[in-house]
Amino acid sequence: MKFSVEYVEYALLVFVRISMVIAIAPMFSNTNIPRRVKVGTAFFLSLVVMNLVDYSAVSYHGMLGYSIVLAKEAITGLLIGLGSGICLYILNFSGHLVDMEIGFAMVMEMDPTTQVQTTITATLFTAMFMLIFVATDMHYFLIDTMIDSYQLIPIGGSKVTPFLQQVYMDYMVDYFVIGFRIILPIFCCTLVVNVVLGILAKVAPQMNMFVIGMQLKIFVGLAVLFIMVSFLPGITDFIYEEMQKITKLFLQSMKP
């Protein structure tokens, strides 16, 4: 390895981009992972990337110019990590809607991976997704994306274009479409339950439909959730495809 001043500056730029990806990407950004492990992982991945990517001196003028290049690399890494990590919010959105339908939305808990208040079903969906994420080696996709990003966007060559706004708007459309497709079975079953309870309220007004309906919705919702577990691999396929698509589009939007 070279130890000239230019090469040390180059190594710092590589480390900044990779550390930003690890700080926000799924699994790597887990708060249960110690910060020293994250820094060590970013450092050793930077050593690997520096030996795989062709070295080229970065041109800048003074300390201010070098700071601008560092900021560009940090933004590039954050957008790469955001493109993959933002797709997890689809499952969080679906879990919140499921709990609103079956009555679990009144119970909130702390998600240990994100350190935010969330519902039971949202935590369940996220935990099962992360297990499948690791089991299917999707974390290698993130590492490959880090390395391949240097072929598409060289050091200091990132440029945010208006195409990034269009990519984010397309993601918001997919966010709601995929989220509602996940909860569609539960939504349909609770709709049928509400119709039946409405008919019973007219037929037998002496019955307390509020008490019966709350228990019946929970029972039906848990039964449908039990059936939905078998479809979870298909749901994660949608999330993986969305993750890969958004990450690639984010990279293309920063291409010089």
Image (cartoon, rainbow, N blue to C red):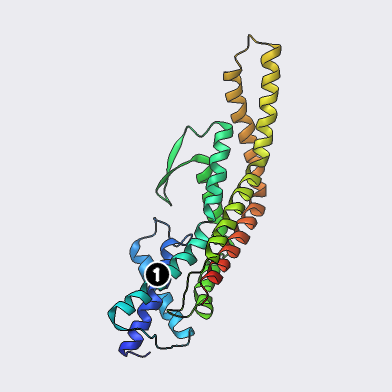
Left or right: where 138 falls relative to 230: left
Q: Position of residue 57 (x, y in %)?
A: 40, 88
Most extreme residue toward the front, as rendered?
A: 162
The x, y position of residue 241, in whole percent, is 63, 61
Give the percent coordinates (x, y) of residue 16. 38, 72
Q: Residue at x 28, y 79 (%)?
A: 63
Seen in the picture, residue 204 relative to 187 is either above or below; the reply is above
Q: Secondary structure at mark 1?
A: helix
Residue type beneath disc 1: Ala
Work out whether residue 140 can be spotted. no
Q: Residue at x 64, y 57 (%)?
A: 237
Q: Quadrant of residue 51?
A: bottom left
Residue farthest left in this picture:
63
Q: Is residue 142 above or below residue 91?
A: below
Q: Of 149 and 143, which appears nearest the observer?
A: 149
User: Compared with residue 123, is residue 6 higher up or lower down, i.e. above or below?
Assistant: below
Determine crowd level at label 1: few under 14, some 14-19, many 20+ residues with C-alpha closer than 10 A.
many
Q: Which residue is mark 1?
A: 74
Q: How many marks?
A: 1
Q: Nearer the viewer, residue 55 or 136?
A: 55
Considering the image in quadrants, where does the N terminus appear?
A: bottom left
Q: Is residue 161 visible?
A: yes
Residue at position x 58%, y 32% from top?
A: 102
Q: Residue furthest top?
A: 206
- Find residue 77 and report its image quarter: bottom left
User: In the shown orientation, is residue 13 left or right of residue 154?
Assistant: left
Residue 113 at x, y percent in the picture: 43, 52
